[in-house]
Amino acid sequence: MELKKEYIDEKTEIAYTLKGNYYFPNLSISKDRNFTIGRYGKARLKYIKQYNKVLYNNLLLSGKLNAYLHSIDTKCNTILARIIIKLAKQENVTEDLKASHQLEWVARMNNIKNRAEEIIYNEYVYI
């Protein structure tokens, strides 16, 4: 029986080439842009490497890992800023408070930032 020189796996859509008696995947280094990855992207990478290996391998092999992590990081930073503004407004942490009671303002803003980061990690990074 003659083996095909090339074979495409229908499930993974990866092409294979026959060399000798073995099929080797046709893999190439992608021209994926090199984005800078921040803290949320790095945390997401660590999480998917440990708990979602299928997603990690699919993104890595398709050349989309860096862009995916960059989009997660950008999204998290944008949402974090919105949450901080919203919570500060709800809790009446204003510039007037900053001018009159600086230490209280710092303590309350740190509390707000910590809660906002907890929301980001639980809803966007560790899912």
Image (cartoon, rainbow, N blue to C red):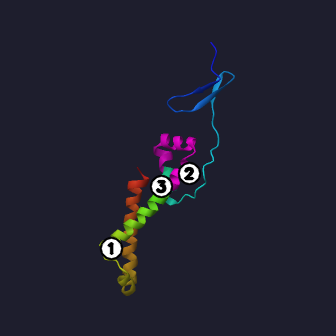
Q: Residue shown at 46%/43% (left/top)?
A: 52
Q: Residue shown at 51%/60% (left/top)?
A: 39
Q: Residue shown at 56%/44% (left/top)?
A: 60
* Residue of label 1: 89
Which residue is most to the right? 20
Element under disc 3: helix
Which residue is most to the top? 1
Which residue is most to the bottom? 100
How many residues crowd around disc 1 within 10 Å: few (fewer than 14), some, or many (20 or more)?
few
Task: State which tag comes first along the sequence, 3 or 1.
Answer: 3
* Residue of label 3: 72
Q: How far is the residue under mark 3 from the one under mark 1?
A: 26 Å
Q: How far is the residue under mark 2 from the one under mark 3?
A: 10 Å
**Which one is nearer the viewer's eye here, 8 or 47?**
8
Q: Please state which amino acid type lies under the numbered disc 1.
A: Lys
* Residue of label 2: 66
Asked if the magenta segment contains residue 54, the reply would be yes
Q: Please state which amino acid type lies under the numbered disc 2.
A: Asn
| Magenta-colored span | 47-71
Q: How far is the residue under mark 2 from the one under mark 1?
A: 35 Å
Q: Please state which amino acid type lies under the numbered disc 3.
A: Ile
Element under disc 1: helix
Task: State which tag comes first along the sequence, 2 or 3.
Answer: 2
How many residues crowd around disc 2 within 10 Å: few (fewer than 14), some, or many (20 or more)?
some
In the displayed structure image, the side of residue 26 where residue 75 appears, left or right = left
Magenta span: predominant SS is: helix
Indicate the position of residue 4 as horizontal and vertical percent values: 63, 20
So how many labels did they put on this image?
Answer: 3
